[in-house]
Amino acid sequence: MPEPTPTRGRPTLSQDALAERRDEIASVALRLFLSEGFASVSMRRLGKEVGLTPMALYRYYPSKLDILARLWGYIIGKAFEGVTAAAHGADTPEDALSRAAQAYVSYWCENKDHYHLVFMNPGVTDTDVRSFVGEEETIAQYDVFFQAVAKVRSADRMAPSVKIATDGLICHLHGIMHSLITIQGYPWTEADTLVADAVERVGR
């Protein structure tokens, strides 16, 4: 019998090798997006930075937006690492909520470039943002606030009043962050005082 003809094409990557390469691409993309802006960095440019042709780069990420979504998830995950750690071991539900809220606002105010990339990116559409925010994994990150508010109010996590109060708190925190980051010429009250006031309103 004739010998089988060798299969042409690129060898299949192991899952570990694929994950490692995706991490490398995401790391380089984060650096470029932060320094030059998401809209300014093409897949060709990114591929050159990581030693891949644009076509080869699509082997790892179907689009530039998929890379951005990966970075959004990473950044929000880092923010909530601090939130969860801050709330852990608090003496009272009120203290846990206060610590969580303070940590959330502090992260974004201390990482303004991350805030701009996630919440003020001119290179993405509202549809793109809604798709990411609507993912279960993203929503689950914010559950730490819903749980904390429920304990402060001695209510069920799924109670409508908890939903309203938590949504209001998150909106309040984002308003604080946005104002402090984007309107720096105004003599704002200190962030921790603004956050404390927002948290106090939850218990009213």
Image (cartoon, helix red, strand yellow):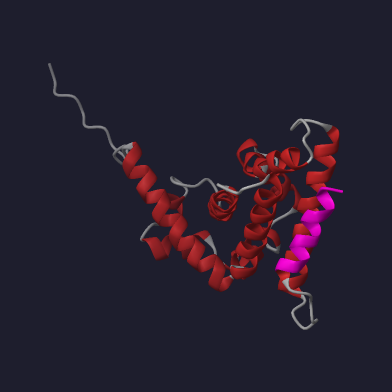
Q: Residue 74, position in %: x, y?
A: 53, 52
- Picture residue at 36% right of the left edge, 61% below the top: 51
Is 112 in front, or is 29?
112
The residue furthest top is: 1
Left or right, 111 with respect to 93, comes to left
Left or right, 104 with respect to 67, comes to right
- Picture residue at 49% right of the left edge, 47% below the top: 61
Is 71 in front, or is 107?
107
User: Which range is magenta?
Assistant: 192-204
Q: Residue 35: within the magenta?
A: no
Q: Residue 200: within the magenta?
A: yes
Q: Residue 109, position in %: x, y?
A: 65, 68
Q: Main secondary structure of the magenta part?
A: helix
Is 195 in front, or is 132?
195
Q: Is residue 110 above or below residue 171?
A: below
Left or right, 51 with respect to 182, comes to left
Q: Residue 163, position in %: x, y?
A: 81, 39
Q: Is residue 22 above or below residue 174?
A: above
Q: How many marks?
A: 0
- Picture residue at 37% right of the left edge, 50% below the top: 21
Quick one: quadrant of the N terminus? top left
Residue 98, quarter of the rendered image: bottom right
Residue 79, quarter of the rendered image: bottom right
Q: Is residue 158 above or below residue 146?
A: above
Q: Residue 185, position in %: x, y?
A: 77, 83
The residue furthest front is: 91
Is 35 in front, or is 10?
35
- Picture residue at 29% right of the left edge, 39% below the top: 11
